[in-house]
Image (cartoon, coloured by chain):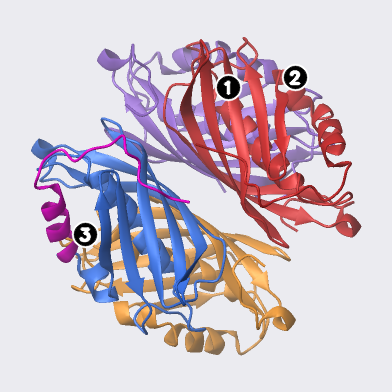
Chain colours: A blue, B orange, C red, D purple
Amino acid sequence: MTTPDTKFSFPDDETKRRITENFNRQGFLIHAGAELGLILPGFVEILLPHSSNVDQQHGYFHGGATATIADSSAGIAAQTLIANGSTVLTTEFKINFVAPAIGDRLIARGRVIKPGRTLTVCQSDIYAEKENKETLIATALLTMILVPAMRNREKDHVA
Amino acid sequence: MTTPDTKFSFPDDETKRRITENFNRQGFLIHAGAELGLILPGFVEILLPHSSNVDQQHGYFHGGATATIADSSAGIAAQTLIANGSTVLTTEFKINFVAPAIGDRLIARGRVIKPGRTLTVCQSDIYAEKENKETLIATALLTMILVPAMRNREKDHVA
Amino acid sequence: MTTPDTKFSFPDDETKRRITENFNRQGFLIHAGAELGLILPGFVEILLPHSSNVDQQHGYFHGGATATIADSSAGIAAQTLIANGSTVLTTEFKINFVAPAIGDRLIARGRVIKPGRTLTVCQSDIYAEKENKETLIATALLTMILVPAMRNREKDHVA
Amino acid sequence: MTTPDTKFSFPDDETKRRITENFNRQGFLIHAGAELGLILPGFVEILLPHSSNVDQQHGYFHGGATATIADSSAGIAAQTLIANGSTVLTTEFKINFVAPAIGDRLIARGRVIKPGRTLTVCQSDIYAEKENKETLIATALLTMILVPAMRNREKDHVA
């Protein structure tokens, strides 16, 4: 079970507001219907209601939609631990699909496993919710890179 | 450079038609604006034009959009080698982002590395096209599982 | 923290004995000095004492040694859940190194996340122990394939 | 097929000598019987003869041995492109096993896909050689981090 880790704290009072603002400027997520859930230090939930915008040919959630909220929940979890001006980018991730992605909505729970000066390693577990019962449908392991404020204009992936 | 492998062939004359039909029933891909490109035995291209539906907060292609076409190009490449009735599902994949995903469109080129009775291993290279110049922006390694026709109604991920 | 999952049970009374026998016939593990620790249903520990046989040029544990016990702890954890005659093979894994592998010994704790008829998804966390203090140094996500008894003579990786 | 990329060059005349020296101080590789093969800019081969030191219970090469030379061939390929004093460490890798690892020796061919200031992405294909015929048995995708000379004393994995 993916649960928040109490050893982390927000870098400043504006962290949650910044994260929400950033999220709302991500066309791909908004367009898919994704929403932010719980935002804690080093832990972030993303919710994705089922719709024809996110499914594949059998009516299940598309693997790409699942991967997208896995990636974003982990990236934003890493973002909760860094000060204003710096950015977090995904350098790579791996995802395993362990059960059919069928249900009313998906819930991705991203959390920081190991924060670092340059790289932060995260995990995300993705659950399908159906009639209020959650089933683990995928799990991901991800590496984020911190782009410090002064280098931020480049925003390149692997520096 | 990702190029077609001439050792493969289509299982029947209907392969390309089936693949196109399946693609057009995938809400998530269609909604994002993805299109099928070249379809060869064991090799498939997916094109993704830039739009506000697929970007993130800096105007680049979202990593989730990149991962989605990587996954789909590889899955469909595996699908080109199997007979009607059987299905291919992604069991897992890993993607590395190697350059900023900026440009007019992305081109994912998926190909089969090793076909198998149960598992098929694929690769996908994703390029950003800008002013007719292509740059490699991500590379993925993926495992597909073959679900034979008779078990097809279950359509579960890891059987 | 990687802990045993009480929902699993051994398929028969001989499981632990078979696992120990198999382990002792793996030249690569024995030669490196690896030892079996705790063996529970769906959960296995492998211990690797530090020696010149397992280090790299700076005296740390070699990443390959770390990956080896990650792989084996997860594979054997999957093996604890299957009946005599069937075999488990690794189809793929991914490992993230999160801290320097320095200490008196490594402890890999593999556990089954999702067992399946064909594929079993596992996780392994690897800790370095130094002066009785454990530090997480790597985490891995792995896919195992079950080779049923009757197909066992082939023992091929991806069937 | 994994082949050298002619766009790279060695940073200085001492590169090959340094790499050979470093290799010979890696206890785990030497103990397993691994040897350096071709060393070109951004491309490195590692050879691993079959022996009881590197096999598993069925007499095949152990997956951990395969992963070890995949990792090392890629890491050393990255090392060929950096100047004296700086070091390359593996941050993470993923490997797919695509055929049984059976034969007289394994040959891992690592190459740099994308060099970077901080991260370098590499690939490694591993072949089993039997009666002079090579078969692809595994493929890996790896991320290396560059530790500059001045920070080199720390030698930590994820900075």
The residue identified by callout 3 is B102
What chain does mark 3 sit on?
Answer: B
Do residues under tags 1 and 3 come within 8 Å of each other at their CB atoms? Answer: no
**Which segment did they paint magenta?**
A1-24
Res B152 quadrant in image: bottom right
Say which of A66 and D106 sits in front: A66
In the rendered image, residues at marks 3 and 2 fall on the same chain:
no
The residue depicted at 49 percent of the width and 40 percent of the height is D93
Identity of the amino acid at label 1?
A: Leu
Q: SS for tag 1?
A: strand
The residue depicted at 72 percent of the width and 39 percent of the height is C40
Residue D70 shown left or right of residue B104 in the figure: right
What chain does mark 1 sit on?
Answer: C
Q: Position of residue D77 (x, y in %)?
A: 46, 30
The residue depicted at 83 percent of the width and 34 percent of the height is C22
The residue identified by callout 2 is C31
Q: Is residue A146 above or below residue B156?
A: above
Q: Is residue A25 above or below residue C17?
A: below
Label annotation for residue C106: 1
Identity of the amino acid at label 2?
A: His
The residue depicted at 70 percent of the width and 63 percent of the height is B116
Image quadrant for the N terminus of chain B? Answer: bottom left
